[in-house]
Amino acid sequence: MKQAGFFDVGERLARLNGLGDLLEAFSLIVDFEVFRPDLEQALAYSTGSKGGRPVF
C-alpha cells in the first residue's frame, strides 16, 4: 500500500462528492452534532499529555 500524497485526500473527497457521497446526503437529514458529546465522552480515555500509547 503506497503512502498517500499531499493532494490524494482532496482528490479522493472530490471523487466521492462527484459519485454522490452518502454521508453528505445523510448530513442533510441527520444532525450529527447531536452525537458529539456522547462520542467525546466515550472516546476521551487519554489526554495525551504523558505521550505514548493509551492504555488498553
Image (cartoon, helix red, strand yellow):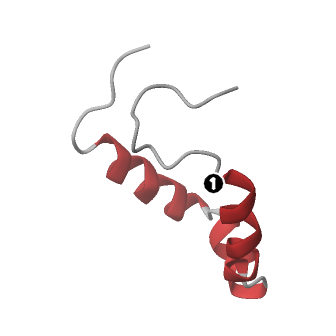
Query: Residue at position x 45%, y 55% from top?
Result: 13
Query: Residue at position x 64%, y 28% from top?
Result: 55
Residue 25 sits in which quadrant? bottom right
Q: Residue furthest front?
A: 50
Q: On the image, numbered disc 1 is attached to which residue?
A: 44
2 over 26 or under it: above or below: above
Q: Residue furthest left?
A: 6
Residue 34, given in percent of the width and then of the height, sits at: 74, 82
Query: Residue at position x 69%, y 86% from top?
Result: 28
Q: Nearer the viewer, residue 40 or 17?
A: 40
Quadrant holding the N terminus: top left
Q: Residue furthest top?
A: 1
**In the shown orientation, is residue 1 left or right of residue 43?**
left
Query: Residue at position x 65%, y 47% from top?
Result: 45
What secondary structure is marked by label 1? loop
Residue 21, given in percent of the width and then of the height, sits at: 62, 62
Q: Nearer the viewer, residue 6 or 34?
A: 34
Residue 42, given in percent of the width and then of the height, sits at: 75, 56
**In the shown orientation, is residue 19 left or right of residue 47?**
right
12 over 51 or under it: above or below: below
Label 1, residues with CA under 10 Å away: few <14, some 14-19, many ≥20: few
What amino acid does circle 1 point to?
Ala
Quadrant holding the C terminus: top right
Image label count: 1
Q: Nearer the viewer, residue 20 or 31?
A: 31
Residue 23 sits in which quadrant? bottom right
